[in-house]
Image (cartoon, rainbow, N blue to C red):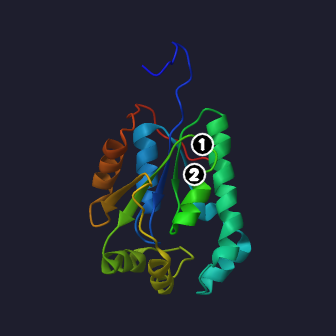
Amino acid sequence: MTGERPGDAQPTRHVVVMGVSGAGKTTVARGISVATGLACAEADEFHSPENVARMRSGVPLDDTTRWPWLRDIAAWVAERAAEGRSTVLACSALKRSYRDVLRQGPLRVDFVHLDGPAEVIRARMARRQGHYMPASLLESQLATLEPAEPDESVLVLDVSLAPQALVAAAVRGLGLPVSATVGERTR
């Protein structure tokens, strides 16, 4: 027992499903939300119109364009934590410094890294429709990606697995409680 009294609020949990574009972050984050009831958000929805236009035209984002975006995402997570709500977020979180920004605020942020062969991810990107991120930017994302360091709480899963298997592995691997209620998508 850690000194909790009956009726004390349970600490919130925050999960970031990370990886390069096309890895399946949104699908897995939504699946985790449905399985657990965690509030869900898609980091792409936090991008400024300028960032979206830049990526749509095939120009990768740099740190200058990413910092405000990451701070907005971290603020959303912190607001949910202050409300006593746990969250799951689909976000590339490619660099350690980006993950550090997302860790600010809430007591606990865990990461699920969807990792795997570039050819699997490239094939997924070729099949999806209506996304502004062109497959041509995959190489820049792979070059930017910094694998987790030993002191980071990151569960690495094989992107080649089926989405349902990834969701189940994430829920089990992070010890998330399964909910009978349907998760909600909030922004």
Give coordinates of residue 39: x percent, y percent. 55, 43
For label 2, the SS is: helix
Q: Mark 2 Cα within 10 Å, few/some/many (few <14, many 20+)?
A: some
Residue in front for this viewpoint, 30 or 111: 111
Residue 65, position as x, y percentages in the image: 69, 74
1 and 2 marks in contact (CB < 8 Å): yes
On the image, numbered disc 1 is attached to which residue?
Answer: 106
Q: Position of residue 84 (x, y in %)?
A: 61, 32
50 relative position to 136: left or right: right
Q: What amino acid type is highlighted by mark number 2?
A: Arg
Q: Is residue 166 above or below residue 159?
A: above
Position of 106 with respect to 128 (left or right) is right
Pick the residue in front: 3 or 113.
3
Categorize mark 1 by other alpha carbons within 10 Å: few (<14), some (14-19), many (20+).
Answer: many
Residue 14 in view in this figure: yes
| Residue to which mark 2 is pinned | 103
- Above or below residue 7? Residue 147 is below
Extreme residue in the front direction: 151
